[in-house]
Amino acid sequence: MKRKQVPWSVNGLALAAGEACCAEPEYERKTRELIAGERSYLSRRIRESFGWHVWPGQANFLLIRLHPHQTAGELQLKLGKKGIMIRSCAMYTGLTERDFRIAVRSREDNDRLLDALAGIAEEGEGC
């Protein structure tokens, strides 16, 4: 993954903001707690609702694998029309066209994603 990463993936202003936030122990603690709770919630809901594989991790994103008849590219297009972006991971060595990544966000944002996924499933569009 490192070979594929863009070397300037964070601009100077974002880096300065991140460093300032990390200098505040209380902010860091609250953020870690929020992400841990939401990561667990989102992982569980995705597994239970859609039966997709969610890899365990500690980051603020989840790596997910769709069922064999589904592709991340198709899902990316459908969610994009609903104003939600995901990252297809097909270009990474060892991953497939069925793999994608999502950010772990606030409960409101995570529920919006889950609702959009459920809507796609209900419409019979598949992923």
Image (tube, rainbow, N blue to C red):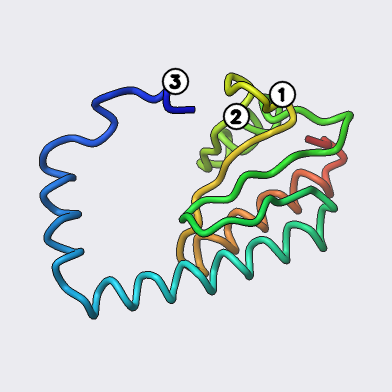
Residue depicted at 23% across the width and 80% down the height: 26
**Depicted 93 relative to depicted 108: above or below:** above
Q: Quadrant of residue 40?
A: bottom right
Q: Amino acid at mark 1?
A: Glu
- Does the CB distance between marks 1 and 2 fall below 8 Å? yes
Rendered location of residue 85, percent (x, y): 51, 38
Residue depicted at 43% across the width and 76% down the height: 33
Neighbourhood count class around disc 1 (C-alpha, 10 Å): few under 14, some 14–19, many 20 upward: some
Rendered location of residue 88, percent (x, y): 60, 29
Residue 51 as seen in the image, left or right of residue 75:
right
Badge 2 is on which residue?
88
Badge 3 is on which residue?
4
Q: What is the secondary structure assignment of the residue under circle 2?
A: strand
Q: Amino acid at mark 2?
A: Ser
Tag shown at residue 97: 1
Tag shown at residue 121: none
- Precedes in sequence: disc 3 or disc 1: 3
Rendered location of residue 43, percent (x, y): 67, 61
Question: Mark 3 or mark 1, which is nearer to you?
Answer: 3
Residue depicted at 25% across the width and 74% down the height: 27
- Precedes in sequence: disc 1 or disc 2: 2
Question: Which sits in the foreground, 70 or 5?
Answer: 5
Q: CA distance from mark 3 to mark 1?
A: 16 Å
Q: CA distance from mark 2 to mark 3?
A: 13 Å
Q: What is the secondary structure assignment of the residue under circle 1?
A: loop
